[in-house]
Amino acid sequence: MSRSLRRGAVAAVIAVAIAPVLAACSAGSSAATLQVKPNAAATAISNGQLKLNGVAVVTDAQGNAPASVIASIANNETQAENLVSVTVGTTAATLTGTTAIPSGSALSLGTPGANATLATVPTLDQPAGANIPVTFVFANGGSVTLNAQIQTGTGEYAPYAPATPTPTLTAVLPSASGTGLPAASGSAAAHETKKAGEPKKTSPSPSSTH
């Protein structure tokens, strides 16, 4: 075999060897590195125009309820949307803050801040680490249910943990008997007066006249 033919054969072998690598690099959404999915759930409704990303349920640091639902809801519809309700398992969440989502805008549910929109559930049917169905209902887009993981409010989820209620202190006024002072008496003994060098005097009690 001539030298030129040998070079051509070697080049062909190299091309065949690197073909799978090049295919993986240009595979787009099917590339191996893109098959790793985060724990947060995602879905879309209304023909893909209403997208929910990063959906999770966050407890306190010990994995206890109440829990907060977090999600990023993007509205690509031509009309404004409104988040009507959120249900975690069988428990309805309490919505606070602005639930309107203008067209071309997004709602960050559960993100702390001065104008935060929160969805809080008092109890959970599953422990931390489990997946639980979460249902979102919208005024125009309808409803959608997806399984979201329950995360403890630690690490990257610590900022989303529900706030711990501040205990209320009640002032307790001491009773008269607890001050060490004698209680006032309406008896004649309370009117006793005495001067130095004089015998003890007692004010007479008023007598009733019939």
Image (cartoon, helix red, strand yellow):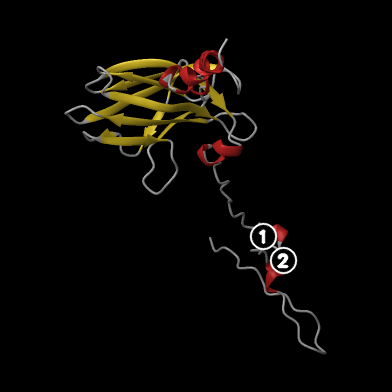
In percent of width and height, residue 101 lies at 26, 34
The residue that appears at 67% across and 72% down in the rendered structure is 204
Kindly state the secondary structure of the residue where label 1 is placed: helix
Q: Is residue 84 left or right of residue 1?
A: left
The residue that appears at 54% across and 42% down in the rendered structure is 165
| Residue at the limit of the structure toward the front, as seen here | 2
The residue that appears at 40% across and 27% down in the rendered structure is 53
In percent of width and height, residue 36 lies at 53, 22
Q: Three-letter amino acid code at disc 1?
A: Ala
- Which residue is label 1 attached to? 176
Instruction: Estimate how packed mark 1 is, as few (under 14), some (14 to 19) or many (20 or more) residues with alpha carbons within 10 Å.
Output: few
Which residue is more in the foreground, 67 or 148?
148
Residue 135 image label: none
Q: Is residue 127 left or right of residue 135?
A: right
The answer to whether residue 125 shows anywhere in this view is no
The answer to whether residue 187 shows anywhere in this view is yes
Q: In the rendered image, which quarter contains the N terminus?
A: top right
Instruction: Estimate how packed mark 2 is, as few (under 14), some (14 to 19) or many (20 or more) residues with alpha carbons within 10 Å.
Output: few
In percent of width and height, residue 102 lies at 22, 35
Q: Are dots 2 and 1 in contact, CB under 8 Å? A: yes
Which residue is more in the foreground, 187 or 108?
108
Q: Based on the displayed image, in which of its 4 quarters is residue 106 positioned?
A: top left
Q: Of label 2 and label 1, which has the lower sequence position?
A: 1
| Residue at the limit of the structure toward the top, as seen here | 1
- Which residue is label 2 attached to? 181
Which residue is more in the foreground, 90 or 116?
116
Kindly state the secondary structure of the residue where label 2 is placed: loop
Estimate the spatial distance between the alpha carbons at disc 2 and disc 1, rounded to whole Å.
7 Å
Which residue is more in the foreground, 40 or 169?
40
In percent of width and height, residue 115 lies at 36, 46
Q: Three-letter amino acid code at disc 2?
A: Leu
